[in-house]
Image: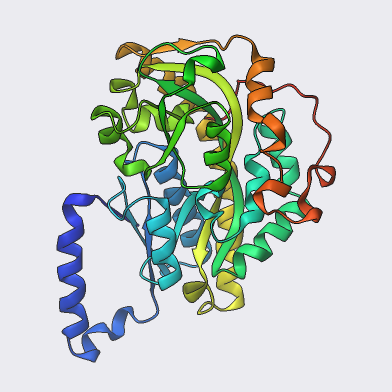
Amino acid sequence: MTIIDRRHLLKLSALGAATLAAPAFVRTASARTRSLTVASLFADDKPETKIWVKISELVEAKLPGRFRFNVVKSGALGGEKEVAENIRLGSVQASLSTVSSLSGWVPELQILDLPFLFRDGEHVRKVVAGETGNELKTKLAAQQFIAADFINYGARHLLTKEPVTRPEQLEGKKIRVIQSPLHTKLWSAFGTTPVGIPITETYNALATGVADAMDLTKSAYAGFKLYEVVPYLTETGHIWASGVVYYGATFWNQLDDEEKKVLSEASSEGAKYFNQLIVEDETKSVELALSKGGKVLQPEALDEWRKGARASGRISPASLGVSRRYRPCSLPETTGQTKNRGGV
């Protein structure tokens, strides 16, 4: 497996062009090896990249020499939406993504993003491991995304430049949001002005005043060094961030049944490994943020946060264009309690 950062990306592109121009016989020896370009938002010390090391090792053990994973890290291939578009085009073969970023193609994915719906990470895993998860995979496949398995990034928390513990303190602020209808509706309900910004551009947007706040998981908070520009993390735990390990249909449809089986199984094992890594990385991420001047706050009046999120029924499956079969009645019962532990 090859790990590629931004510095080596241009060199790789030049090499690729030279290879295409070479005589056919030069390439014959490697004709049986399939190369995958895999996009990762983070460096090689984060779960988002480590999972691909794990998957590549599992695949190599079953199918020696059949696949070469070229992991382009640190967001060198763009944010999640840019990567998804390139996967559909076939220029990138695999990546991870939050369901939020894929909801433009599959609105039903937003059911997993509903605020204060899930108790904890295990509650989410039970849902995606059942009928709901299978149906969402089918809808993703119809959009040229082959979801091998679901992953859990952990809970999303509020990040601000100034201390915010009560929802009314957000009024009038500009908040960076994932480019998703649900996230726009959610933060509009708190009197903020939502601004859709790709994650790779968020640091600069916060530093220059384009945005005043955002929400994110603890692991990504440290991964992007956001404690430098939004030092206050309020543990709202309002959304449990689900994601997928996925491949492009153009790539997937070229595989034989054995290759699909091995990649699917390796991806599922990789997803379990990722979920474990995220829990461990959360602790390290908080420790790092605190050492750099970040501060962790507890929310006050949690019932008011929930009320704001569900204001006037604006945040519901129906308001998001989600069909009846994906309404909360098809999900396990919730207790109305959201834990701020585990996950990201």
- Return the x and y of residue 314 as percentages of the image width and height: 67, 38
- Residue 99 or 251: which is nearer the viewer? 99
Is residue 178 something one can see in this rendering? yes
The colour mode here is rainbow
- Return the x and y of residue 260 as percentages of the image width and height: 58, 70
Is residue 66 something one can see in this rendering? no
Residue drawn at 55 percent across, 12 percent down: 166
Residue drawn at 53 percent across, 55 percent down: 102
Q: Is residue 199 above or below residue 187?
A: below
- Return the x and y of residue 307 as percentages of the image width and height: 69, 23
Q: How many marks?
A: 0
- Return the x and y of residue 130 as percentages of the image width and height: 77, 50
Q: Is residue 106 above or below residue 195?
A: below
Left or right position of 8 against 156: left
Left or right position of 145 against 307: left
**Residue 226, located in which quarter of the rendered image?**
top left
- Residue 270 or 178: which is nearer the viewer? 178
Left or right position of 210 against 143: left
**Residue 23, located in which quarter of the rendered image?**
bottom left
Residue drawn at 52 percent across, 11 percent down: 165
* The N terminus - image quarter: bottom left
Q: Is residue 223 above or below residue 35?
A: above
- Residue 240 or 110: which is nearer the viewer? 110
For this orientation, the residue located farthest to the bottom is: 24
Residue drawn at 37 percent across, 55 percent down: 39
